[in-house]
Amino acid sequence: MRSIGKIKLAIVLSVGLSIGTQSSWAGAPAPGCLGDVVPNGNVNVDDLLAVINGWGQTWVTHEVSAGNTLTFTPNAIAAKSGDSVRWTRKTGAHTATSGTNCVGDGLFTASLNAVTTQFTFPIPTDFVGDIPFFCMPHCSFGMTGTITVGSFWQDVTGNGVVNVDDLLGVINGWGPCG
Ligand SMILES: [Ca+2]
Ligand SMILES: [Cu+2]
């Protein structure tokens, strides 16, 4: 996509080199502040650059297997808002159950056995934080894991891909929030 490349180059050139280091991801955008990708209450060139840096990223599905070693593999999953996590039973009978200290929190629970071999959990698009999970029969043996969910605010339009729509979303929201 040479035109996209030109757009990106043009934007980078037009904003010049006066931009300092990108702000850290300190919190969520203000409600109703479309385009505040780097959440600071103001839609500006920082947000434009964040969208450009995230260009082409999409929602993805993270694969986790459950096996007779009484472990989830991997047991630490780095995901982003809107991604999915799919558990696949390799051997034995397990569950994928959200919660901590072997106590379910009601977000999800599913059997993983010879009959039901897979379960997919779509991470809510507005969720950021940790989602701990465990296997009910084997939790006391340490069969646990954690999904660490980072923000995907570069996807301004919330449709699962960072593209020109998100660039336009930032431009349309330009200026102070609220
Ligand atoms: Ca988008
Ligand atoms: Cu298990």
Image (cartoon, rainbow, N blue to C red):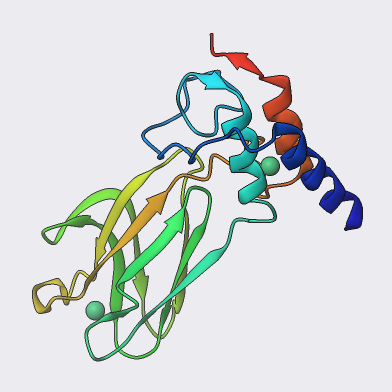
Q: Is residue 54 above or below residue 87?
A: above
Q: Could you say where residue 97 lies in the image, as x and y percent from the top left?
A: 28, 62
Point 44% across, 76% down: residue: 116
Ligand 2 quarter of the rendering: bottom left
Q: Could you say where residue 174 lies in the image, as x and y percent from the top left?
A: 66, 19
Q: Is residue 20 above or below residue 98?
A: above
Out of 140 and 23, give the one closest to the viewer. 23
Q: Is any part of residue 124 visible from this angle?
A: yes
- Identity of the residue furthest to the right in this view: 3
Point 82% across, 41% down: residue: 10
Point 48% across, 48% down: residue: 81
Task: Say left or right for 23 vs 131.
Answer: right
Count of numbered badges drawn on the protein: 0
Q: Quadrant of residue 58?
A: bottom right
Task: Say left or right for 35 vs 27.
Answer: right
- Identity of the residue furthest to the top in this view: 178
Q: Where the N terminus falls, by quadrant?
A: bottom right
Q: Quadrant of residue 177?
A: top right
Q: Could you say where residue 5 lies in the image, as x and y percent from the top left?
A: 83, 53
Q: Quadrant of residue 71?
A: bottom left
Point 52% across, 56% down: residue: 83
Out of 125 and 3, give the one closest to the viewer. 3
Out of 174 and 19, give the one closest to the viewer. 19
Q: Is residue 116 above or below residue 129?
A: below
Q: Could you say where residue 36 lies in the image, as x and y percent from the top left?
A: 55, 27
Q: Is any part of residue 155 visible from this angle?
A: no
